[in-house]
Image (cartoon, rainbow, N blue to C red):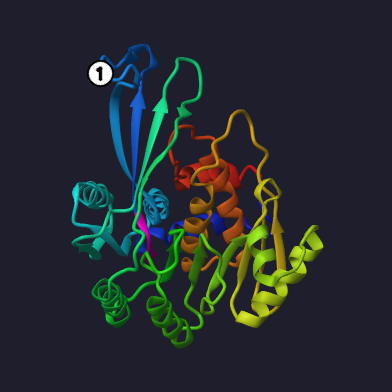
Amino acid sequence: MKPGMTAERFEAITGRYPRLCVALLGDFCLDRYFDIDPARAEISIETGLPVHNITGVRCLPGAAGTVLNNLVALGVGTIRCLGLRGDDGEGFELHRALAARAGVDLSGFVAVPGRNTFTYTKPLLHRAGQPPEELSRLDLKNFSPTPDDAQAAIIAAMDRVVEDPRGADAWMVMDQVDLAETGVVTARVRERLARLSAAHPGLPIVADSRRGLQGWPAAHWKMNAAELARLTGRSLSDPPAVVAAARSMAMHLGRPVFITLAEQGIIGASAEGAVAHVPAHPVCGPIDIVGAGDSVSANLTAALAAGADLAEAMHLAMAAAHCVIHQLGTTGTATVEQLRSKVLAS
């Protein structure tokens, strides 16, 4: 536990979670798991190819939905989802999976005819006594620009959150698509985000993009060291170089910056130039890093919304990541109780 973060401080921060409202803007996808029993393998009579018999299907929210799963696990009171789905079977499954989560508001989650629901299909081989083995993934994406009316619907949903007297205690923005302008966080949406950020400089707005944050408005930028290097155009081969680049970027943005360092933990820089480093917890046994970054995003957002300082938020995020990477064959989450056992023992 960091010096000064007492058990009372932990309880004070996490105790505010049920009263929080978080706006979650970005690319929600369907994580569809096919559980396969290799003992039931066959050979197709028609093609002579192997047949994988599926013994179970699990449909879970992924991408921004993974952030949502973590916010729900933390007990955040209200999560306002701002995103898009197709008007298709995958969209139905995704909407149903989101709606089943406690505290989720889907009034800003828009169905768009003619678009695919962003879907990751993950076949998993289950062998007794072994971690699940993931076979080649099957993805369903969109490769054409997001329609203007869909972008307008997202911006209108953002406006409703801003104009609502209850507002939001924090925003988390997640851009997950590989091809620019094909998802939710388009240039038009970023323009609206820029106005929100300028109007509310003290509001936590945590932003993460699969393609990097070049050209994004000022927000609480979260990225890894490789993304930071690409963004700055500099070689960041050692921790002091990462610290210097993070400090410079945070002071330029006027908002905090978070740099994840895998097994070396996380660095955070404040707008005033203060820097903190929180190490990662040691791993024990097999790990699965899928979803670890999303758990960090969720925990940073919730903690900052609840009044945590940068170092406190990063300690909670590192504890969550440690819980998640030890959950195999699924995209895991961490509860407040799990965090308590990690943070108060460190």
* Spot occupied by residue 252 in the image (x, y as percentages of width and height): 65, 82
Under tag 1, what secondary structure? loop
Q: Residue at x 46, y 68 (%)?
A: 305
Q: Amino acid at mark 1?
A: Glu
* Spot occupied by residue 178 in the image (x, y as percentages of width and height): 46, 58
By secondary structure, the bulk of the magenta-drawn segment is best described as strand
Q: Nearer the viewer, residue 173 or 175?
A: 175
Tell me if residue 274 can be seen.
Answer: no
Tell me if residue 181 can be seen.
Answer: yes
Which quarter shows the C terminus?
A: top right
Say left or right for 13 vs 46. Answer: right
Give the answer, above or below, for where 292 lies relative to 186.
above
Q: Which residue is mark 1?
A: 46
Q: Residue at x 50, y 58 (%)?
A: 297
Q: Residue furthest front?
A: 47
Q: Quadrant of residue 49?
A: top left
Q: Nearer the viewer, residue 3 or 253?
A: 253
* Spot occupied by residue 299 in the image (x, y as percentages of width and height): 50, 56
Say left or right for 31 vs 226. Answer: left
* Spot occupied by residue 285 in the image (x, y as percentages of width and height): 62, 28
Q: Over which residues does the magenta segment extend? A: 23-28
Q: Quadrant of residue 308?
A: bottom right
Q: Nearer the viewer, residue 11 or 78?
A: 78
Q: Residue at x 60, y 58 (%)?
A: 314
Say left or right for 226 vs 76. Answer: right
